[in-house]
Image: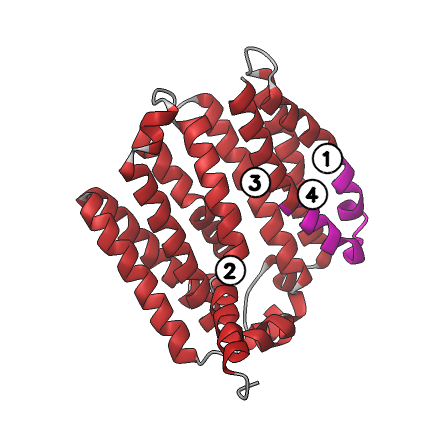
């Protein structure tokens, strides 16, 4: 491939984008913009929102920090990924390790420079975020239960930042935060179930490889069952049914449908379950968007 410089450079670019998890970043950016304007922002008009440079700055810094986090996580999980994700690892092999590290440092520095220009508090916010992303990859990802809770918390950290920025706290947002936390937690627990053997070989203490299979399946089922209850509470607390309310109504039936393969320990169905849950996150963002546009 080195005989074709253009193709080789494109392969290197693809390696870096995969390391930064570009597809996750695109979904994250879309979700952060939709939730910020239609959920957290209760006063600003669209015009004010578009020209609020701090909002765009915070979202941009969040995206850069998460991209850097994807790169450093890949660096620490490289040996594990060679077994669990051989195709992606092969694509990433076109770029030397040092360039991934350069990318990690560069993305974090740009994020910190921009956040420092926005305000000292925003700078501290991202310093803390970047530190815990690194510490998760370095240490916390191998600690039982802590790994799952930290991963989900870091995934939601930028949303919390936008909530603090707009200072719009309510029972509705609190319940939605619990809902999203539990949804992300169930996805992470199923991921551990699918990579159980690889995690055990490389010293990752997860629920799936420390306890019996039954414990893991029951824990996932309990998390989803609690989210059914949370969905019902969210709907019950709505003054009137809107488009977004229907998302939580459908969630109760959706989780009930997924509980069957989980409670019957059908590991061959877990790949489909985890991807359906991931799609359900995206569907939730779409419901929020349409609710905001047509409310």
Instruction: Look at the image and name its color scheme.
Output: secondary structure
Give whichever of discs 3 and 4 has the lower sequence position. 3
Q: Residue at x 55, y 29 (%)?
A: 288
- Name the residue that disc number 4 marks: 221
Does residue 14 show up? yes
Q: Which of the two labelled residues, at mark 1 and mark 3, occupies the earlier sequence position? A: 3
Q: Horizontal and vertical percent for residue 2?
A: 53, 87
| Residue bounds of the magenta highlight | 256-278
Residue holding disc 3: 182
* Percent coordinates x, y for residue 169 in the rendering: 38, 25
Q: Is residue 281 above or below residue 291?
A: below
Label 2: which secondary element: loop
Marks 1 and 2, how far apart at CA: 28 Å
**Considering only order in the chain, which callout, 2 or 1, is on the residue closer to the N terminus?**
2
Q: Earlier in the sequence, mark 4 or mark 2?
A: 2
Mark toward the start of the polypeptide (4 vs 1): 4
Mark 1, other Cα within 10 Å: few <14 / some 14–19 / many ≥20: some
């Amino acid at each position: 491939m080195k005989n074709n410089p253009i193709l080789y450079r494109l392969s290197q670019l693809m390696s870096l984008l995969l390391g930064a998890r570009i597809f996750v970043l695109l979904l994250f950016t879309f979700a952060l913009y939709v939730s910020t304007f239609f959920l957290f922002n209760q006063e600003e008009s669209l015009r004010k929102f578009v020209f609020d440079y701090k909002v765009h700055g915070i979202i941009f810094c969040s995206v850069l920090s998460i991209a850097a986090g994807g790169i450093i996580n890949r660096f620490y999980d490289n040996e594990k990924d060679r077994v669990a994700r051989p195709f992606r690892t092969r694509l990433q092999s076109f770029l030397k390790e040092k360039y991934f590290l350069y990318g990690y440092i560069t993305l974090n520095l740009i994020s910190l420079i921009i956040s420092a220009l926005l305000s000292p508090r925003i700078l501290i916010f991202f310093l803390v975020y970047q530190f815990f992303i690194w510490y998760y990859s370095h240490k916390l990802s191998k600690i039982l239960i802590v790994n799952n809770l930290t991963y989900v918390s870091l995934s939601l950290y930028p949303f919390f930042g936008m909530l603090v920025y707009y200072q719009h706290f309510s029972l509705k947002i609190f319940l939605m935060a619990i809902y999203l936390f539990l949804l992300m937690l169930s996805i992470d627990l199923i991921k551990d179930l699918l990579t159980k053997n690889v995690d055990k070989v490389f010293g990752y203490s997860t629920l799936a490889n420390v306890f019996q299979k039954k414990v893991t399946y029951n824990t996932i089922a309990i998390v989803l069952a609690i989210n059914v209850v949370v969905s019902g509470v969210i709907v019950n607390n709505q003054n009137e049914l809107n488009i977004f309310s229907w998302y939580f109504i459908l969630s109760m039936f959706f989780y009930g449908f997924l509980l069957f393969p989980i409670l019957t320990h059908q590991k061959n169905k877990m790949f489909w379950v985890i991807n359906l849950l991931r799609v359900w996150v995206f569907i939730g963002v779409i419901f929020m968007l349409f609710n905001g546009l047509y409310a």
